[in-house]
Amino acid sequence: MTKQIQPSRRSVLLKAGAVLAATGPFFHVRPARADKGEIVIASWGGSRTTAMREVMFQPFERASGVRVRDDGPPEAAKVKAMVEGGSVTWDILDTDIPAILTMANNNLLEKIDYGRIERTRLEKIPQVLQHPYGIGHLIYSFNILYNSKTYSSSQHPRSWADVWDGQKVKGARSFPFRGGISPQLEFALIADGVPVDKLYPLDTERAWKAMDRLRPLVTKWYANHAEAIQLLTSGEIDICCTIGPRGLVAKKEGAPIDVVFDGGKLAPDNWAIVKGTKSVEAIYQFLNFALDGKVQAELAKRIPYGPSSQEAFSYLSETEAKDLNTSPANLAKQFWNDTAWWGALTADGKTNQELQTERYARWMVRRG
């Protein structure tokens, strides 16, 4: 069980702000002189969490005196067991909107008190990322990825219409499927000619007819994004619908992969607060620190996911920004996933996400 934090949020933020202004957020920060408690952040591990430790967790510890531990993965089943068992050991989750919708519907999260987020930070974060139960901080995107050995710079697919057109752009395709994953109906509609600004509410019947046309072109349905990148790198597939930032990581490591931002679907990973936490004061101290544009810029230099704060681009060079999906240039080419539509309840009491995911499973086993 985490401890209640005593000092005022204002005093700690002023101390952290002075450090940021004087030295930047990551160097020469004096260790706090007193133990100010602890928060536990559940994230997904790997290079992502390693980068967060370097640019968020450890600098915040030094500036505030609040210890930060990381754990995870932030699975909804574990949160449910903690909350219902009355033994909450996680304070903050780093997770996506589908998980947040599920946990919020099961009363496992605290609402975000946006009045406790510094106004100057909040103003730099798009309203679409300010969900009642989660605030977006790290942006991923579903994009068109292609094998750069297969296609020249003039021949590669440039739109979802190209991906759906097996005569114009030949090559093996891969799309995601596993139990519980939502279908990419937005891309089916864009390929069918629906303008991006007219996507929602989704015309699901039209989308599924377009999915029928895609199906013969898909030679492999991948189960996770790591598999997608491996298939693309090996040349087993030529075109893929997967997470663009993952492709950029692989490209930097030498994989023959390029990313098309046009028509990409943006969605956030979010900070969410576990129901029953005893560390509310420290949580908001951390959120204010982590949402700072300079801090987000440092994270983006380590992992190529888009910062949610547009202020971050004031601290990034043109070269550093060009491959980030939320840079002003790339943001204009993409659209935000409408979580309100996916999370809306239908007449039978299920969300659109639940209904379409179930339909996806039936569609996958259908013959012909």
Image (tube, grey):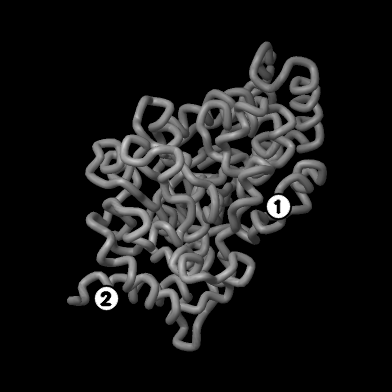
- Residue 163, given in percent of the width and then of the height, sits at 39, 57
First in sequence, mark 1 or 2: give its number: 1
Q: Quadrant of the C terminus?
A: bottom left
Residue at 32% from the left image edge and 73% from the top image edge: 212
Secondary structure category for the residue under label 1: loop
Q: What is the spatial separation of the Cα atoms under label 1 and label 2, in whole angstroms? A: 36 Å
- Residue 128, given in percent of the width and then of the height, sits at 66, 58
Image position of 353 (left or right of 149):
right
Secondary structure category for the residue under label 2: helix
Residue at 44% from the left image edge and 79% from the top image edge: 206
Q: Residue furthest top?
A: 28
Q: Is residue 357 visible?
A: yes
Residue at 28% from the left image edge and 67% from the top image edge: 215
Q: Is residue 223 visible?
A: no
- Residue 97, given in percent of the width and then of the height, sits at 52, 58
Q: Residue furthest bottom?
A: 347
Q: Which residue is denoted by mark 1 in the rendering?
A: 126
Q: Which residue is denoted by mark 2 in the rendering?
A: 362
